[in-house]
Image (tube, rainbow, N blue to C red):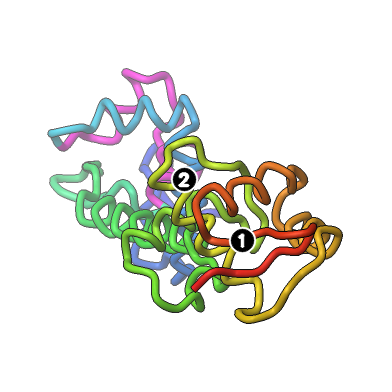
Amino acid sequence: MSNEAPGRLPQARVSQTPQLDERRALVMSLQALLNPAMLQVVAALYGRERSLAELAEELGLQPSVGHGPIGRLAFLELVSVRSEGGQLLCRLNMERLRTLNGALQRLSRDLFADDKRNPVVDEAEGFSDKERRILRAYLKGERLVEIPVQQAHLRVVLRWLAERFEPGRSYPEREVNELLKRYHPDFATLRRHLIDFRFMERAHDHYWRLP
C-alpha cells in the first residue's frame, strides 16, 4: 500500500529516470510527442510553469506524475516537476528538448550520409568533387538508375563508363553489349553515346576506348 496521505499527490520521481540509449530515448520521446493527449500537455505548458492540479483539471487528466500522459512525459524528462508550497509545479524541460533535437540532427546526418555513400564512386580516380556528386546522383552501387538527359551530366557518366573498358584493347560488339548491360539495360543507347561523345571508336563491329 502507498504511505502517502489521502488526497496528497505522489512525489515526482524524475531524478530516477533510467539512463536510456540516445536513439532509444529519441524514438520514445517522439512517440510521446505524437500522442494527442501528451501533445496537449506540451501545448498547455509551453512558455509557462503550471501546477499539476490546474493542468490536470484543464485537460481532464489524472493529477499524477506516476501515471497517464503527464507521468509519461515526466518519465521521459520532457516535463520537469518540482514541489513548492505544498503543490507540484510542472514545466517543459527545454534543455531536454534541445538535447533530443541535437540527437535527431545527428541521426538525420548519419542516415543521409549512408544514402550518399557509394564506394564505386568514392574509388573512382580523376573525378572532381562536382563530378562525383553527379555520379552519386545517377549511380546506385554500380547500376545506372537512369541515363542523364543533361549533356554535362551525361558526359561525366559516359566518361566513368568508358573507364570500365581496358585501354588498348579491342572489344567485339557482343562483348561491349554484355559489359554495358551490367550498368543499364539500354546498352544500345549507351554504346551509341560512347561513340558520339568520342569516348570510344568503332570499326568492323569492334570497339576500343579512346585516350
Q: Quadrant of residue 77?
A: bottom left
Residue at the image point whose x is 39% and y is 37% from the top: 7
Location of residue 54 in the rendering, given as x and y in whole percent from the top left corner: 26, 26
Residue at the image point whose x is 65% and y is 72% from the top: 165
Q: Is the residue marked by circle 1 packed among few (<14), some (14-19), or many (20+) residues within 10 Å?
A: some
Q: Residue 72 carries which label?
A: 2
Instruction: Check disc 2 and report its element: helix, strand or loop.
Output: helix
The number of numbered discs placed on residues in the rendered structure image is 2
Location of residue 115 in the rendering, given as x and y in whole percent from the top left corner: 52, 57
> As shown in the figure, which amino acid type bears the numbered disc 2?
Arg
Camera-side residue: 56 or 118? 118
Left-right relation of 108 to 92: right
Left-right relation of 100 to 146: left
Q: Mark 1 points at which residue?
A: 201
Q: Quadrant of residue 104?
A: bottom left
Instruction: Check disc 1 and report its element: helix, strand or loop.
Output: strand
Q: Give the range drawn in magenta.
A: 49-74
Asked if residue 54 is among those painted magenta in the image, a careful observer would answer: yes
Location of residue 59 in the rendering, given as x and y in whole percent from the top left corner: 37, 20
Camera-side residue: 85 or 58? 58
